[in-house]
Image (cartoon, coloured by chain):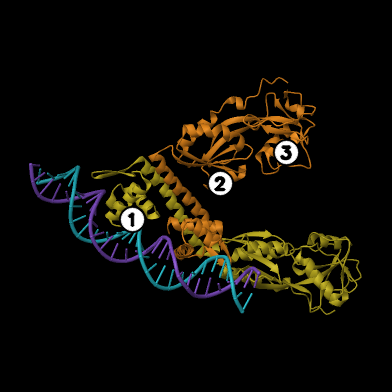
Chain colours: A yellow, B orange, C cyan, D purple
Amino acid sequence: MNLRDLQYLVALAEYRHFGRAAEASFVSQPTLSTQIRKLEDELGVALVERTPRKVLLTETGREIARRARGVLSQIDEIKSIAQRTRDPESGTIRLGIFPTLGPYLLPHVIPRLRERFPRLELLLREEKTEQVLHMLREGTLDAGILALPVHDESLHTEFLFEEPFVLAVPGGHALAGRRCMRMDDLAEQNLLLLEDGHCLRDQALEVCHLSGAGEKTGFRATSLETLRQMVSANVGITLLPALAVKPPVAQSPNVSLIEFAAPAPSRRIAMLWRKSSAMTPFFEALAEVIRDIPEELFATGDCQP
Amino acid sequence: MNLRDLQYLVALAEYRHFGRAAEASFVSQPTLSTQIRKLEDELGVALVERTPRKVLLTETGREIARRARGVLSQIDEIKSIAQRTRDPESGTIRLGIFPTLGPYLLPHVIPRLRERFPRLELLLREEKTEQVLHMLREGTLDAGILALPVHDESLHTEFLFEEPFVLAVPGGHALAGRRCMRMDDLAEQNLLLLEDGHCLRDQALEVCHLSGAGEKTGFRATSLETLRQMVSANVGITLLPALAVKPPVAQSPNVSLIEFAAPAPSRRIAMLWRKSSAMTPFFEALAEVIRDIPEELFATGDCQP
DNA sequence: GTTCGTGATAGTCAAAGCCTATCACATTGA
DNA sequence: TCAATGTGATAGGCTTTGACTATCACGAAC
């Protein structure tokens, strides 16, 4: 049995005439006759009642023709899906992003993506970095936005932007009056950090290491917002990524933000997808849109400590 | 595109390995590889992400494979229609049933089915309720026997019988001497229950809710037989469905069974199949045979607490 | 660096789908 | 009543396709 057989049967059901059914199917009448006969042989039942100058389908033939229409309809759907994929801007992308970036980047990015790809359906998934990588590898995510470095040769890495850190201190802190500082100025300070599993923790530890700062003991936050609230509550000081302190994020009460002089500590953000993905060209276009958000979101002022 | 192509794609989606998909499809690996490639060429899109030692389907490939399963399912229906026309009572039915019913119902049902439909081949599949429903929907089961309610408009529901629960207590338990009780008598008791995923757990929780009983903490059984053994070992008390305590099921040592007065807690069992199935008349006959098992299997004694 | 697993390619062959030519048979019209 | 016509079936043949085995190419694992 094959799809052409089903097409012939459906045509025969409609025309009830071998010649006209053949013509509608773009084959010769003997071809259609033979194929219908072979289908009957394969199924072991009569589908057609052949009477002189008249063709009727048996009850079984009518029922099978009905199902055949459903099958052919689904085949058309399959071709439609394929056609839509050739025009990818109308499909669905599953995009992973980690929690200390997603809520601050996406408000800038989503409107631009909707404008650029109005027919795209974007399914966002907020997970920690390791989980995003895992889901990318096993194919439950199509792409991810992560901080570098990522060591995975099976993934393509498309650099997006560099996001600097700023120091957040309570309003009454000794450093609060400063607009700008050098990394060295962090020496002897102890910072509030996130718990294990967050890449921001590792990134902040790297800054601590370079600057001589330490981690405030006896405390680990579960989210960036918790860190911010702790600073606001005079519990301590912390590093925050630039996007997390720029509009539309509201300024927190009792929190002063201090930028760093060059070379400022920062994290490099990239979009990753499987090298084997068929969507590479499209992902590159998507990355381009993300890369195009305004630089003033990251830019520090003219910082001369 | 032809039906074999769709079969190959579905197999590839399942195995994610060209060799195993080919083996399952009874062709050689080069054949399957070539046919998939030709299908991709015909559709003009990549269906498969080929990475070293790992095969993933693209999102388009997954979507098309999903549709292909539907197509192949309808082709099976067409063959089934033809086979049923040739010989209505032979052929193969794939029947799903959940684990806390199957082992206790089937011994009563199988002999009657074999007698009534001697040429029928019954393939039984024991799965939890959600899995049976999933397999019904995707066409890997023809029918299922499940507890109601089931909310799925695409499935036909044919009520079979109502199966009451009995309370199983250890021989030395305070309630052990009673033959009969009201549901209220369960208040303040804590019952051993199955783990998540078993519909019997939900059914028992409903009884707990109505009667004021609770769940015994720190314990969750993986099977009904484990529950029974725990009662036998004086660990606690539990609800058991009636069929699970009637012959040919052996009576457990040190376990007393107490029936409930009307209205007794119970679960309603039904047979479900796809409304689109061509086998509806036959399934109705099959359900009739199941419905006809002796009522004393469920009947409670004259229970006057 | 070698071995192994896996998917792709090359060459080949049998089967299938399709063709044209023609046949067989029933219906229709003169 | 008979010839003409319409229609579906059959025969022979050709092209295409699906399938094979053998082998290659490449990346991962050891």
Q: Tell me which amino acid carries mark 3.
A: Leu
Quarter of the image with the N terminus of chain B in it: bottom left
Tell me the quarter of the picture where residue A205 sits: bottom right
Residue annotated with mark 1 = A25
Q: State yes or no: discs 2 and 1 in contact (Cβ < 8 Å).
A: no
Q: Nearer the viewer, residue B107 or A46?
A: B107
Q: Residues within 10 Å of mark 3 (few under 14, many from 20)?
A: many
Q: Nearer the viewer, mark 3 or mark 1?
A: 3
Residue annotated with mark 3 = B193
Q: Tell me which amino acid carries mark 2.
A: Met
Identity of the residue drawn at 86% across and 61% down:
A219
**CA–CA distance in space, label 3 to label 1:** 62 Å
Residue annotated with mark 2 = B135
Picture coordinates of residue B77 (x, y %)? 45, 45
Chain letter, disc 1 residue:
A
Inspect this view and state whether residue A36 appears: yes
Picture coordinates of residue A295 (x, y %)? 70, 73
**CA–CA distance in space, label 3 to label 2:** 26 Å
